[in-house]
Amino acid sequence: MEKKKISRILEEIGLMLELKGENPFKVRAYVNGARIIELLEGDLKDYIKDGKIEGIKGIGNALSDKIVELYETGKLEYYEELKSSIPAGIFDILKIPGIGPKKAKSLYEKLDIKSIGELEYACKENRLVSLDGFGEKTQRKILKGIQELKKYSGLFLYAYVNPIAEEIKKILTASSLVTKCEIAGSLRRKKEVVKDIDIIASSMEPMKLMDFFTGLDQIEEIISKGETKTSVRLKAGMMMDLRVVKEEQFPYALHHFTGSKEHNTALRHRAKKINIKINEYGLFKGDELIYCKDEHSIFNALGLNFIPPELRENMGEIEAAESGKLPDLIEYEDIKGLLHIHTTYSDGSLSVTGMAEAAKQMGFSYIGISDHSRSAFYANGLKEDDIKRQIEEIDEYNLRSKDFKILKGIESDILPDGSLDYDDDILSLFDFVIASIHSNMNMDKEKMTDRLINALNNRYTTILGHMTARILLAREACDMDVYKIIDTAVKNNKIIEINSDPQRLDLDWRYIKYAKDKGAKFAINPDAHSIEGLNNIIFGIGIARKGWLEAKDVVNCMNLVELGDFIGKQTK
């Protein structure tokens, strides 16, 4: 088992022990152990093989035995026993903002509440008002949190679902029963949040394929099964549809079930004007099928250039395809370097050098370190002495390295009045400054808009980080005039971040096209706190493509000299 999963299990054990009222020192041992394993440099197997695991500060004999058991077997009996002793619904209750282990334990022991449904009923019956540690205000907050969870029920992050879909597609494609197979739906369009998985396949033996599919280990429950469509619920939690068509029908079915509905409707109206009917079975002139070997042929038959799946949202893509004005969308290979990287100086899991070498191995030519500023105390934000030490370390690395460079940056908190977290004499030390909101997110629309505009008016602001501060499926975007903020960024020649963290993907793609049309420049940033986090960049590229961006719109598609020249103009 990889160390990331081991860390998560140790953290869960700590949580469960706290729920059961265990000794706080024991709880803390598991929580600290989880953090130690997560931040451990190098491969865990080397520590285990050499017997060094017990020598790590904070890892005692009992904990090291459990880590070894998890690593070698992928299971831990102690963990399973603990989990079975706690009602499953308690873990759902812990997802509600404001409810931690102590409150969940109190609800269970005093009111026998062990599910969200029971908690909602208790709130509506006013039962929490007189409960120690709660009260009327807390009850209202919990009820609001339950409504938020309901709103997001049945939705999943793209980054969580896509690997599952790709794995199933790979298994189906390897089968001799399949001739063609592709992921469709919102996943193919790279929507940031999806409801389910759609896969289209062609086969000469559809029922045999359906039998093969429904026998896969990934399936929890078969909802319906037929020759052309089978619906299942996966063990991972989401629904999935497999549709099977004849090979000659495959391009039409793939296009239709890729969607979106709005794109398909607009395309049908266009087709109707030239007396063509389009559906999942084909293109028809009267009763005659217009043969199309692939999706390119479908669009060409309608007098259009091929429209990439990410753009199929009825946001002007059909008109652009007709006039030959579709963008040459950005690709992964266009990215030259990665900005917005965190290290162990704040809340990252790897050193400055470690993150640089990892990015270099990925084929990039530079990174920009941007640890948290001092106001982010929860993330070990940098004090002035830390800044000076980090700058010295980066300078030393750059002197040694010829073919890879590190840019010196900071992620500076935007304070409530719009000022940045350091004085100008400190901000002037950095090659770039990412200005971001991390607190006071409930300001009214006018004040929040002014706050961000003030930050953009600061000569040292280089990039506006995760503009709306949303957390997908957890926290709504801050209330602000996004268009006014974009206009200010363009006017001041500031860069707008596309934060590639799968839980952010902010700026929203629906605003990106507007910003591009206004002449904005973007940075697609991984917001990486680990080596794995560097790979977030691929999700940001997907969102950039949905926003119609080309390489020329993105500053980290520039080489280091070009980027330096661009940033240098901002503070003049």
Image: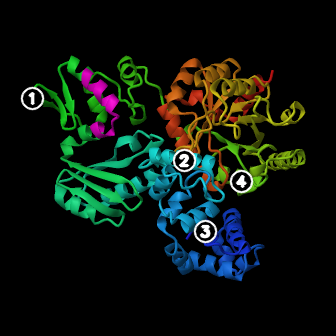
For the magenta stretch, what is the residue range?
A: 255-269
Provide the secondary structure element on which disc 1 rests: loop
Q: Is residue 230 left or right of residue 466?
A: left
Q: Secondary structure at mark 4?
A: loop
Location of the C terminus by quadrant is top right
Q: Earlier in the sequence, mark 1 or mark 4?
A: 1
Overall secondary structure of the magenta section: helix
Q: Earlier in the sequence, mark 1 or mark 2?
A: 2
Q: Earlier in the sequence, mark 2 or mark 4?
A: 2
C-alpha span from label 1 to label 2: 55 Å
Quickly name the residue at label 4: 348
Q: Nearer the viewer, mark 1 or mark 2?
A: 2
Question: Badge 1 is on which residue?
Answer: 287
Residue bearing mark 2: 145
Magenta segment: does it hold 205? no
Q: Label 2 to label 3, Cα distance in Å? A: 20 Å
